[in-house]
Amino acid sequence: VPIRKGLFAAARIHAELGEVLAGKVGGRASAGEVTLFKSVGVAVQDLAAASCALARAEAVARRDAARLYAVHVVPSIDGSRETQARLAAEFGPVLDEFVAGSVPASGIGVRREVFPYTGHRSGLIEFCAVVDADLLAIGTRGRGNLRETLLGSTAEKALEHSTCAVLAVKPPVT
């Protein structure tokens, strides 16, 4: 709205916040620079939490010489191979970009999977069972909203139902 009203020039925008979080573009270079952020949801907070969880999981996998998967779970629409291929084609490049921005080039291979799940918020638990995971590292914001108050957070569901250990990683407070 400020751009449409002529109050702010689009040329003054350095980057989208997601680009900064993914490491594609540098953030503020001095205290005199201003970051303007208008949140209309929690997607950016989820991205920050997931990035911290992936970095922690990468360190554990490197230490233990373990397999590491970065998983983006998506609802299974009809279970067909065609739909799964379409979902992988749609979300795979986004996952690749996220992993590249979150995990340093440490020599450990991160397997990227787009995983269609069948039940509400159960995709991560289903994936862990499929690959016989030893540890699920999951990002959490550490505070709830109304939906989470009523249904429980994804991290809480993972703790309750997962057959493997769960590491809930909260991003640092800045």
Image: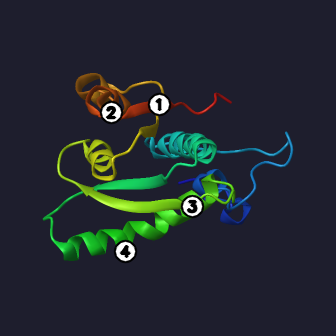
Element under disc 1: strand
- 50 above or below 89? above
**Identity of the amino acid at label 2?**
Ala
Closest to the observer, 111 or 76: 111
The circle on residue 109 is 3
Closest to the observer, 30 or 24: 24
Q: Is the residue under label 4 in contact with that under label 1 (CB below 8 Å)?
A: no
Q: Residues within 10 Å of mark 1 (few under 14, many from 20)?
A: many
**Identity of the amino acid at label 1?**
Ala
* Cα distance in 3D space between marks 4 and 3: 20 Å
x, y percent for residue 75: 23, 55
To which residue does mark 4 refer?
89
When asked about the image quadrant of residue 143, the answer is top left
To which residue does mark 1 refer?
168
Q: Is the residue under label 2 in contact with that under label 1 (CB below 8 Å)?
A: yes
| Eye-nearest disc, 1 or 4 | 1
Q: What residue sits 39% from the left and 61% below the top? A: 113
The circle on residue 158 is 2
**Identity of the amino acid at label 3?**
Gly
Q: What residue sits 31% from the left and 68% below the top? A: 87
- Judged left or right of residue 170, residue 132 is left
